[in-house]
């Protein structure tokens, strides 16, 4: 009996293996036939020795991530293909890679209906232990509903939050040494962002700058984002992720958000009973993001999903942008000098949104920080139907490229922003002056583009510009205090492994 059972097991496995191989062959034939029907030449390919799961490519990528050289890995893989568009097998999925602006434009606008995010974020369970279908993880009518819910707040907040920002920047400035001693600004900016985001989004700041022990949600979010990045990469193999600490951090963040949500619902009930508008402790009318959408979302789980949909993509964006900008300024005193002159020329006028936008060199500096040190690396979409993207194929690299239903397309903003063909031979250099004549369209998309552009992009840039002005009003110089190169550690986005160690020279 044991011999028969073993024989049957072997036979079953053999049949399953042959069926699996047969499906791969049929899929490949269908792919090639459809590609030719669309009139697209074959894409250059990563030389996978494992053409089924791409284990060799998976190993190479995860090794680069572990060694904190993912940016260099990106450059090398593109350079080795000799093309700005190519394909590879990764975890059994066909990946299509592009650093062409026209493909980014098509993916985000004219061809957007052929691509989606839900299958690679929600459908495979990659982010569902932490977040449901929100503005950054859904498609179609549900995405439109989420977008309509959150966008009005950020349109308004980007222009109207500067007075509210002042107290947080005051606290930040109070933590910067004035005696020329070294300070790592990266953790300060991280705590500063926790304070501003909890104030603006939830109506009550954690004040972790004054109370570092209250910074635990930020540390948990780092754990959450690191796990999310891994789960998104594992794709259909996400079941292999069994990190207990990650699941525990998700639960702690859920409880943290739920406490704000329950408080908002209680205030809504009180508002109905008293017929008086809800206020903060100082008597000001409540107008934070949670309060703005809570009255439209009566379900607690759905409301938490909408909050995490905003908090995940923005969690490090502002703090990383500010840290990267200070990092760059410490290495370019000539830029600090020009910025200081522009800020002094602005005078003692109130710092308004319009006032910040009027400082051209300030805008150029923040743009250049985005370009050289990205806060987000690439736009990734799942192909929902056979289609093409405009360019990158063929020997000349100008033919359309074919995207097969089920392909996962990566538009690499990091490489696009450093492409000498787009930015000139000094593309790797930090030089804000280039923006005097630059007219970027789809070759500069730090927040993505099209209808799915980050809803908080105006607010992020405004907060960074405001903080830079306040810092350079108080200090006339910024000195670097380490010679370590910028070394990105990948979570959902990159953060400098070595921090931002500098010293400030009082004005």
Image (cartoon, rainbow, N blue to C red):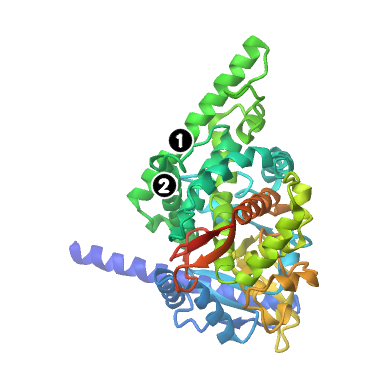
Query: At which x and y percent is residue 16?
Result: 41, 67
**Residue 467 drawn above or below residue 56:** above
Q: Indicate the quadrant containing the N terminus: top left, top right, bottom left or bottom right.
A: bottom left
Circles 2 and 1: CB distance less than 8 Å?
Answer: yes
Category of crowding for the residue at label 2, using alpha-carbon neighbours closer than 10 angstroms: few (below 14), some (14–19), many (at least 20): some
164 relative to 65 in the view: left or right: right
Counting residues from the N terminus, which is met first, the one under dot 2 or under dot 1?
2
Query: At which x and y percent is residue 405?
Result: 64, 65
Say what secondary structure mark 2 lies in.
helix
Task: Report the residue at 68% width, 48% height from top.
Answer: 459
- Give me the C-alpha separation between circle 2 and circle 1: 11 Å
Residue 28 position by quadrant: bottom right
Looking at the image, can residue 113 be seen?
Answer: no
Q: Residue furthest left?
A: 2
**Residue 176 drawn above or below residue 368:** above
Looking at the image, can residue 69 be seen?
Answer: yes
Query: At which x and y percent is residue 371?
Result: 65, 68
346 relative to 273 in the view: left or right: right
Say what secondary structure mark 1 lies in.
helix
**Residue 304 drawn above or below residue 24:** above
Mark 1, residue position? 256
Task: Report the residue at 62% width, 67% height from top.
Answer: 409
Closest to the observer, 221 or 57 = 221
Mark 2, residue position? 220
Task: Report the residue at 48% width, 38% height from top.
Answer: 207
């Amino acid at each position: 009996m044991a011999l028969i059972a073993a024989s049957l097991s072997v036979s079953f496995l053999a049949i399953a293996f042959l069926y699996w191989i047969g499906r791969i062959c049929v899929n490949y034939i269908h792919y090639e036939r459809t590609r030719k029907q669309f009139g697209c030449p074959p894409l250059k390919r990563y030389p996978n020795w494992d053409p089924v799961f791409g284990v060799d490519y998976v190993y190479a990528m995860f090794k680069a991530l572990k060694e904190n050289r993912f940016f260099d890995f990106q450059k090398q893989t593109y350079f080795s293909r000799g093309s700005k568009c190519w394909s590879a097998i990764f975890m059994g999925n066909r990946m299509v890679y592009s650093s062409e602006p026209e493909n980014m434009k098509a993916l985000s606008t004219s061809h957007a209906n052929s691509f989606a995010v839900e299958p690679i974020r929600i459908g495979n369970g990659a982010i569902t232990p932490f977040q449901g279908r929100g503005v950054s993880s859904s498609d179609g009518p549900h995405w439109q509903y989420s977008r309509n819910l959150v966008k009005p707040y950020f349109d308004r907040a980007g222009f109207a939050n500067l007075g509210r920002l002042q107290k947080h920047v005051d606290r930040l400035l109070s933590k910067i040494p004035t005696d020329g001693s070294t300070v790592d600004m990266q953790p300060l900016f991280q705590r500063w962002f926790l304070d501003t985001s909890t104030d603006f989004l939830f109506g009550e700041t954690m004040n972790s700058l004054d109370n570092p022990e209250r910074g635990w949600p930020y540390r948990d979010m780092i754990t959450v984002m690191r796990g999310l990045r891994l789960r998104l990469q594992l794709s259909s193999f996400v079941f292999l992720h069994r990190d207990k600490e990650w699941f525990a951090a998700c639960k702690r963040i859920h409880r943290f958000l739920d406490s704000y949500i329950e408080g908002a619902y209680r205030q809504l009930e009180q508002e109905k009973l008293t017929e008086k508008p809800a206020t903060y402790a100082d008597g000001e009318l409540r107008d934070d993001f949670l309060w703005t959408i809570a009255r439209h979302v009566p379900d607690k789980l759905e409301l938490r999903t909408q909050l995490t949909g905003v908090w995940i993509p923005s969690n490090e964006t502002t703090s990383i942008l500010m840290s990267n900008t200070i990092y760059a300024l410490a290495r370019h005193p000539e830029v600090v000098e020009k910025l200081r002159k522009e800020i002094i020329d602005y005078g003692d006028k109130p710092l308004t949104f319009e006032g910040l936008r009027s400082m051209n060199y300030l805008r150029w500096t923040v743009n250049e920080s985005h370009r050289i040190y990205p806060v987000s690396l690439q736009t990734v979409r799942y192909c929902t139907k056979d289609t093409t993207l405009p360019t990158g194929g063929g020997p000349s690299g100008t033919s359309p490229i074919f995207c097969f239903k089920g392909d996962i397309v990566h538009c690499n903003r990091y490489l696009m922003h450093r492409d000498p063909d787009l930015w000139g031979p000094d593309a790797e250099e930090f030089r804000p002056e280039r923006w005097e004549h630059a007219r970027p369209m789809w070759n500069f998309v730090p927040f993505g583009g099209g209808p799915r552009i980050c809803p908080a992009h105006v607010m992020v840039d405004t907060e960074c510009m405001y903080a830079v002005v306040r810092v350079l009003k108080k200090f006339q110089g910024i000195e670097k205090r380490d010679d370590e190169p910028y070394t990105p550690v990948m979570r959902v986005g990159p953060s400098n492994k070595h921090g931002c160690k500098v010293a400030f020279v009082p004005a």
